[in-house]
Amino acid sequence: MLAMNKLRILGTTVFVIAASIVITSCKDKRSTGWEYAPNMYEHIAYDPDQANPNFKDGKTAQVPPAGTIPIGFKRFDYPNTKEGYEKAGAEVTSLIAQTPANLAEGKALFTTFCSPCHGVTGQGDGVIVQHGYPPPPSYSKGQSSRGGAMKDLTDGKIYHTITYGVNAMGSYASQVSPDERWKIVMYVHHLQNL
């Protein structure tokens, strides 16, 4: 009788284990069975590249209306030409306050983005130059490739150069915001006097 009870307990245990394996092996272990915010799983919004019957042209990604400017965007209506550079040099001046805080931020931005080529003092002796890259002209002693002394560069000319680049220097428009560019301009003026 005792052997029969042991056999029955063992059989029940094996059955429970086998049933548990079968039941749990079919279940998705990542799901609790609850669905919170189903639109996160099955979204009803159109993807930008999908066709969309809600618009006349059938596209989801719409072109902004003509003449509109994105929020936070600041226009710089001077083309990337020699004429645009000269016009910016004559017409554009900084609108940010000449404060020690702005100058300090300009120095930090210059150190990060400009000093690898221009050097920390703007003498054209940055670490890139030390590795054999052609040096840019010194802000205080050099001559601009566009004509004139580097120490005479105006706000607009420096801003134009940061925005579009010149010669081996590429544009920094995607890395440095317009306000940050003005702070760099302020710091470059400081370096022109060294």
Image: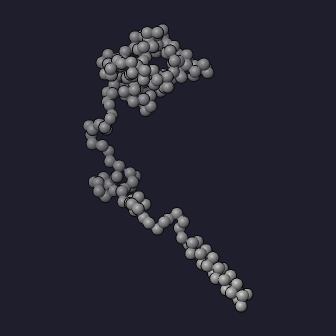
Give above or below for 157 relative to 19: above
Residue farthest along the right direction in this orientation: 3
Q: How many marks?
A: 0
- Place of residue 87 in the rendered image (x, y in percent of width and height, measured from the top left): 32, 19
37 and 127: which is toward the camera: 37
Give above or below for 27 relative to 101: below
Residue farthest along the bottom direction in this orientation: 1
- Place of residue 32 in the rendered image (x, y in percent of width and height, measured from the top left): 48, 66
Q: Is residue 1 left or right of residue 164?
A: right
* Residue at the image position 35 percent from the left and 49 percent from the top: 61
Q: Is residue 160 left or right of residue 122?
A: left
- Place of residue 119 in the rendered image (x, y in percent of width and height, measured from the top left): 53, 18
Q: Is residue 133 left or right of residue 5?
A: left
- Is residue 77 visible in the rendered image? The answer is yes
175 and 107: which is toward the camera: 107
* Residue 15 picture quarter: bottom right
* Residue at the image position 53 percent from the left and 67 percent from the top: 28
* Residue at the image position 52 percent from the left and 15 percent from the top: 124
- Is residue 158 visible in the rendered image? The answer is no
Visual colour scheme: one colour
Q: Is residue 115 left or right of residue 93?
A: right
92 and 127: which is toward the camera: 127
* Residue 45 picture quarter: bottom left
* Residue at the image position 51 percent from the left and 18 percent from the top: 120
Q: Which quadrant holds the N terminus?
A: bottom right
- Place of residue 128 in the rendered image (x, y in percent of width and height, measured from the top left): 57, 22
